[in-house]
Each structure stands twice: as C-alpha cells, then as structure tokens.
C-alpha cells in the first residue's frame, strides 16, 4: 500500500509500494535528510529512518535534533530496501568508519536496489567501489577524494547509483529518487505540488 503521506497525486500513479531506508547520524546535513524523506513520502514511498549509532535521536550539523524510526543495528542484513539513502554533512567522516554502512550499501547495490548519496556521502560509496566506472557528483569539498566528480549537474543517476552535490541540490536528489522508484510522472506531480520551478 502507498505510504500514508501520499496525498499529492492519484493512487493510480503508484504501481507498487516501494521502500526506502534513509540514514541519520550526528553531524548530518539536516536539509539532505528531511527533503528526501518528505518528498519520497509524498510520492507514496514507505520511508524508514535508521540512526547510525546507539541513540534514536541525532543532532544535525546545525543543532537540529532528528528522530529515527529504528537503529541501523536493528535492520537485518537480508532486509533489502528498494533504495538505500545516505545524506551528507560533516558526520559522514565518522559514518565512513562504520563498516556495516558500506557493507549494506554494497549489498543493496548488488541486489539491484538504488543506492543514493549526497554531499560528502559519495565518498562512502567510493570506499566500497560503488563509484568505479560510474559517473558521479558530490560536494566540491571532497573533490580531492573524488577527482572525477562532475560539478556541472545537480544530480546524476548512473544505473542504480544516484549522487548529488549538497544541500542546495536536495530537491533535485529527492525528485531523481522518486523518478527511479515510482515514475517520472510522480516526480513531476510532487514537484508541482511544492511549487518547484527549477
């Protein structure tokens, strides 16, 4: 069934309910968390928010507290979602040390799920070779680690890997996820509903 928040376009547009797992962690860029969660739910995607660490509540880079539905530790290795989403922010540096995050990203990608990362988070995908021979973008601050990143576009989808540049491209990122998971029509309708003019 569509998510309870999918009230912005006809039910007939949703072919099947999709599931997305969105990570949160201390030092996360808040805009890059809330935007995809909000827009994916508008499109009928069932979103689960999982906290990396031992607490359900995390504090973003700008001091905004965010609550998760569960701990990442409680997500079973074989429970694969249709999308695995990693926001950015300075907290990515610590998340890269959590080997299970990279393992789950790789497992989802190998199963054909969409793996999406924004801002500094594409560095984590690079750590587990998910950017090999894939076009990608990221925040300019990580260009030394990702010398081939494309800074000319806000978001790139190459097969099942989606990358985006930062807080200012979070809507592009979320709409690309909706296009991938639901349909281009759904993405257009969500964009229209929020008066997105880009």
Image (tube, rainbow, N blue to C red):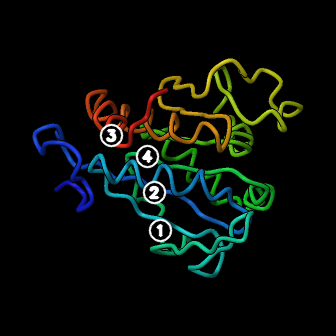
Q: Quick check: marks 2 and 4 in contact, CB under 8 Å?
A: yes
Q: Nearer the viewer, residue 183 or 113?
A: 183
Q: Earlier in the sequence, mark 3 or mark 1?
A: 1
Look at the numbered disc 1 and give the secondary structure of its residue. Answer: loop
Look at the numbered disc 3 and give the secondary structure of its residue. Answer: helix
Q: Nearer the viewer, residue 54 or 103?
A: 54
Disc 3 and disc 4: Cα gap in Å? 18 Å
Of labels 3 and 4, the one closer to you = 3
Look at the numbered disc 2 and give the secondary structure of its residue. Answer: strand
What is the x, y in percent for residue 16?
A: 19, 44
What is the x, y in percent for residue 182?
A: 29, 37
What is the x, y in percent for residue 175?
A: 43, 36
Label placed on residue 176: none
Q: Which residue is mark 3?
A: 190
The picture quadrant where one finds residue 179 is top left
Q: Which residue is mark 4?
A: 83
Q: Which residue is mark 2?
A: 21
Q: How many marks?
A: 4
Q: Residue at x 57, y 28 (%)?
A: 155
The N terminus: image quadrant = bottom left
């Amino acid at each position: 069934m569509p998510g309870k928040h999918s009230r912005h376009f006809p039910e007939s547009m949703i072919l099947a309910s999709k599931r997305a797992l969105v990570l949160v962690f201390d030092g996360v860029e808040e805009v890059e968390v809330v935007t995809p969660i909000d827009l994916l739910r508008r499109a009928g995607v069932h979103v689960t928010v999982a906290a990396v660490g031992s607490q359900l509540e995390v504090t973003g880079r700008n001091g905004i507290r965010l609550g998760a539905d569960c701990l990442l530790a409680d997500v079973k290795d074989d429970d694969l979602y249709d999308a695995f989403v990693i926001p950015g922010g300075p907290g990515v540096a610590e998340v890269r040390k959590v080997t299970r995050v990279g393992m789950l990203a790789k497992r989802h990608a190998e199963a054909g799920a969409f793996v999406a990362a924004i801002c500094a988070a594409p560095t984590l995908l690079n750590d587990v070779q998910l950017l090999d021979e894939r076009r990608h973008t990221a925040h300019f601050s990580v260009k030394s680690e990702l010398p081939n990143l494309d800074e000319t576009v806000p978001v790139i989808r190459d097969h099942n890997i989606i990358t985006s540049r930062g807080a200012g491209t979070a809507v592009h990122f979320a709409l690309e996820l909706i296009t991938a998971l639901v349909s281009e029509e759904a993405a257009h309708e969500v964009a229209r509903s929020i008066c997105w003019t880009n």
